[in-house]
Amino acid sequence: MVEISDSLCSLFTAKIKEEDGTFVIEIPPSEIKHGALTGDETYRIALLDSSSEAESTSPQAPRHPASQGSTSHDSSGPPVDEGEVRDVTIETVGDQGDGIAKVERGYVVIVPGAQPGDEPTVEIEQVQENVAFASIVDSDPRAL
């Protein structure tokens, strides 16, 4: 299992490119737009092998619908709770093939089985400081 630090600011897929004898990782513009990263800052970068398998060893969260979008959250903590059910929009796909959505404050929600453009209803199963893992409870009807 891949350990994800509570200090994770951003999660995206990028290729390493060589430019004039140096190697560059291009930051997607959406990371800046959503406020996950800012220009002129220094960040620590962790690289994950795209062929490695990430496993979820967390127990299944009890299924109980939460009010969608009306839950009150501390602005310094994650904007989602375990067991919360909400609609998300999948923006991209991570290295492991999981869908990645962003909710309030650029907070990342990883959704296995989702593709960019999908708008599934998901249940939040595991919450960490900067990333949550969710499962689809109702697929986007447009994806059929």
Image: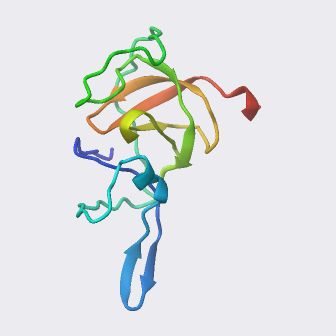
Residue 53 drawn at (x, y percent):
43, 49
In front of the other: 38 or 98? 38
Q: How many marks?
A: 0
Q: Position of residue 100 (x, y in %)?
A: 49, 42
| Figure quadrant of the C terminus | top right
Estimate the x, y position of residue 80 in percent, counting from the top left.
36, 25
Q: Foreground residue, 38 or 18?
A: 38
Q: Residue at x 42, y 46 (%)?
A: 34
Task: Tell me if 3 is positioned left or right of 97 in this view.
Answer: left
Residue 50 in which image quadrant: bottom left
Q: Residue at x 40, y 24 (%)?
A: 125
The picture places residue 6, in percent across and down from the top left corner, at: 23, 41
Left or right, residue 119 beside residue 74 = right
Residue 46 lies, with reference to residue 74, above or below; the image says below
Image: 84 above or below 136? above
Q: Is residue 28 left or right of residue 113?
A: left
Which quadrant does the N terminus fall into?
top left
Residue farthest toward the top in the current orientation of the protein: 64
Q: Residue furthest bottom?
A: 20
Residue at 33%, 54% in the rendered image: 37
Q: Decide: is 39 above or below 19.
A: above
Front-lying residue, 63 or 105: 105
Which residue: 24% across, 62% down?
Answer: 41
State the scheme by which the image is colored: rainbow
Query: With respect to residue 33, does 134 lie above or below?
Result: above
Q: State which quadrant residue 142 falls in.
A: top right
Q: Is residue 102 left or right of residue 141?
A: left
